[in-house]
Image: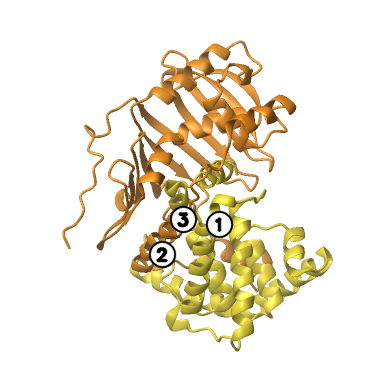
Chain colours: A orange, B yellow
C-alpha cells in the first residue's frame, strides 16, 4: 500500500502540467499588452512623500518600495549601517552598480516545479543594461526561450527557440522612457531590497578566489537573502536566497560594467 | 520570498520584465493547479489566461503582502469556482493530459511515468472538490492550512480533516500503483 508520504511526494514532484509553447507566448504577449494599457500617466510614487515617510518611520518598519526608492533616489549614506565598519564599501557598491554600463550573470534556483527548470538541469543567463533586458532560459545546456526588452527600440519580444516562434510587442514612448528612468538592474534591486529589510553583516570570506564581504537580510516571511560583494572591485559577486519552504535561488558568474552590444545581446529574430 | 518582494516593487512601476519573470515563474504552477481542480485542459488554460491577464491589468496597484504564488493561486481558485458554477462537473480527459515532466528519462521510463502520472491525475480528480482543493493548495502551492481555511471560509480543523481524508482516499485509489 502506498504511504501518505509517498503520495504527498508524488503530487509535489510528479503532478505537473505545462501550457503549450504557442499559447504560452501568446498569453505573455497579451499580458504585456494589458499591462501596457493599464499604465497611468501619473507616476506611481512620489519622492517627497517617501522622504516624509522615511523621516517618520524606522527603516525596518518602512515598506520595501519606499526604501528602495529612497536608497536609489535620495542618497544612500544614512541607510547603509550594516552593523559593520564597512559602510564605505556598500556605498561604493551601490555607486558602481548604478554606473555600470551593463551586467551579465547566471540565475538558478531549486524551487522550480518543473525539474527541467531547476538547477542543475535549468538556469538563466540574464543581461541587463539601462536600455536592454534579456533573459535566456536553458535546459540541459540548450537555450530554449528568450525574453528581450529594448527600451530604445521600444520592443518586447518572446522567442521560443525550438520550435522557432516569436512574439513581438511594442512599448509606448512614455512607458519605455519611464522604465529606463526608474532603475534597471536586478542586482541593484536586490541590493536595495537587502538593505531595506532587517539585515546584519556576515563578515568576509573568499568566493572563487575573490575576497568578499556579505550581508544577510531577512524578509517579513522569514526568507533570507545573502549578498556578497568583492572588497576590491566593489561589485556584487554572489546573491543567495532561501525561501521559508527551503527553496533556493542563486545569482553568480557576474560580469559587471560590460558593453552588452559588444557581447552580442541583440536578438536574431527568425524570418518566418 | 525576497525575490517576490522585489518583483512586486518592479510591477508597481510597470516593469514588463518583472511581469515576464512572474509569468515564467508561476505559469506552470498555476496551470497544474487549474488542471488539478478542473481536470480539463481547455478550461484550465482559460482560467490561467484570465488570472494572468487580470494580474497584468492590476499589477501596478498590487497591494498583496503575501507571496505572489499565493496571490495567483487564490485567483485560480476563485475562477475555477466561477467556472464550476457555470458548468457541470468536468470529467477527466486523460487524452488531454499534458506530457509529464521527465524529458530526461529514457523512452521506457518515460512511458511508465506517463502512466503513473495519468493515474495520479485521475485519482486527484476523483476526490471530492473540497478535499481536492485542500490537497492541491497544500502540496502544489505550499499554502498554509490557515490560509486554505480562509479561502474555503471554514476552520483550520476542517481543512486538516479534508486533507487527511483526501490523502486516505488517494491512497486507496492508487493502491500502490503510482510509486514515485
Label 3 secondary element: helix
Given residues A176 and B140, the one toward you in this image is A176
Of callouts 2 and 3, the N-terminal one: 2
Is the Cβ of the residue at disc 2 closer than 8 Å to that at disc 1?
A: no
Q: Residues within 10 Å of mark 3 (few under 14, many from 20)?
A: many
Q: CA distance from mark 3 to mark 1?
A: 8 Å
Label 2 secondary element: helix
Is the Cβ of the residue at disc 2 closer than 8 Å to that at disc 3?
A: no
**Label ID, residue B58:** 1
Q: Residue at x 74, y 69 (%)?
A: B152
The chain carrying label 3 is A
Question: A124 above or below B32?
Answer: above
- Quarter assignment of residue B95: bottom left
Q: Residues within 10 Å of mark 1 (few under 14, many from 20)?
A: some
Q: Are marks 2 and 1 on the same chain?
A: no
Q: Is residue B139 visible?
A: yes
Residue B104 location, x and y as percent? 37, 59
Q: CA distance from mark 2 to mark 3?
A: 12 Å
Nearer the observer: mark 2 or 1; the answer is 1
Is residue A216 found left or right of B7 in the rendered image?
A: right
The chain carrying label 1 is B
**Label ID, residue A27:** 2
Question: B144 above or below A199?
Answer: below
Given residues B55 and B42, the one toward you in this image is B55
Is the Cβ of the residue at disc 3 closer than 8 Å to that at disc 1?
A: no
Nearer the observer: mark 2 or 3; the answer is 3
Label 3 belongs to which residue? A35
Q: Is residue A184 visible?
A: no
**Label ID, residue B132:** none
Residue A43 location, x and y as percent? 52, 42
Which quarter of the rendering shows the N terminus of chain A?
Answer: bottom right
Q: Residue at x 81, y 63 (%)?
A: B156
Amino acid at each position: 500500500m502506498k504511504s501518505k508520504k509517498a503520495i504527498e511526494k508524488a503530487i509535489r514532484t510528479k503532478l505537473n502540467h505545462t501550457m503549450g509553447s504557442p499559447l504560452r507566448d501568446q498569453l505573455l504577449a497579451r499580458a504585456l499588452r494589458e499591462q501596457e494599457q493599464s499604465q497611468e500617466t501619473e507616476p506611481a510614487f512620489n519622492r517627497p512623500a517617501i522622504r516624509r515617510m522615511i523621516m517618520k518611520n524606522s527603516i525596518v518598519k518602512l515598506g520595501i518600495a519606499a526604501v528602495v526608492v529612497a536608497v536609489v533616489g535620495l542618497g544612500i549614506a544614512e541607510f547603509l549601517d550594516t552593523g559593520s565598519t564597512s559602510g564605505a564599501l556598500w556605498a561604493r557598491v551601490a555607486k558602481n552598480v548604478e554606473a555600470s554600463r551593463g551586467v551579465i550573470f547566471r540565475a538558478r534556483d531549486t524551487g522550480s516545479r518543473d525539474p527541467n527548470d531547476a538547477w542543475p538541469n535549468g538556469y538563466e543567463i540574464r543581461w541587463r543594461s539601462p536600455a536592454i533586458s534579456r533573459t535566456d532560459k536553458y535546459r540541459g545546456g540548450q537555450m530554449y526561450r528568450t525574453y528581450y526588452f529594448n527600451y530604445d527600440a521600444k520592443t518586447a519580444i518572446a522567442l521560443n527557440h525550438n520550435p522557432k516562434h516569436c512574439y513581438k510587442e511594442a512599448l509606448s514612448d512614455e512607458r519605455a522612457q519611464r522604465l529606463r528612468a526608474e532603475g534597471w538592474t536586478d542586482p541593484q534591486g536586490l541590493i536595495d531590497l537587502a538593505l531595506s529589510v532587517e539585515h546584519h553583516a556576515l563578515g568576509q570570506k573568499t568566493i572563487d578566489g575573490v575576497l568578499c564581504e556579505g550581508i544577510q537580510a531577512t524578509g517579513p516571511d522569514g526568507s533570507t537573502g545573502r549578498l556578497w560583494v568583492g572588497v576590491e572591485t566593489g561589485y556584487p559577486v554572489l546573491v543567495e536566497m532561501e525561501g521559508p519552504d527551503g527553496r533556493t535561488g542563486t545569482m553568480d558568474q557576474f560580469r559587471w560594467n560590460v558593453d552588452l552590444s559588444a557581447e552580442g545581446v541583440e536578438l536574431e529574430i527568425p524570418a518566418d | 520570498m525576497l525575490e517576490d518582494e522585489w518583483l512586486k516593487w518592479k510591477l508597481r512601476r510597470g516593469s514588463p520584465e518583472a511581469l515576464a519573470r512572474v509569468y515564467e515563474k508561476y505559469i506552470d504552477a498555476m496551470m497544474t493547479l487549474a488542471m488539478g481542480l478542473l481536470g480539463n485542459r481547455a478550461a484550465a488554460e482559460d482560467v490561467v489566461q484570465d488570472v494572468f491577464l487580470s494580474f497584468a491589468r492590476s499589477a501596478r496597484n498590487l497591494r498583496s503582502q503575501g507571496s505572489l504564488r499565493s496571490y495567483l493561486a487564490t485567483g485560480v481558485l476563485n475562477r475555477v469556482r466561477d467556472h464550476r458554477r457555470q458548468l457541470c462537473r468536468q470529467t477527466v480527459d486523460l487524452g488531454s493530459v499534458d506530457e509529464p515532466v521527465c524529458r530526461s528519462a529514457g523512452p521506457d521510463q518515460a512511458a511508465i511515468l506517463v502512466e503513473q502520472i495519468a493515474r495520479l491525475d485521475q485519482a486527484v480528480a476523483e476526490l471530492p472538490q473540497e478535499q481536492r482543493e485542500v490537497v492541491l493548495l497544500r502540496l502544489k502551492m505550499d499554502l498554509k492550512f490557515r490560509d486554505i481555511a480562509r479561502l474555503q471560509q471554514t476552520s483550520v480543523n476542517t481543512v486538516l480533516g479534508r486533507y487527511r481524508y483526501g490523502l486516505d482516499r488517494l491512497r486507496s485509489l492508487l493502491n500502490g500503483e503510482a510509486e514515485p
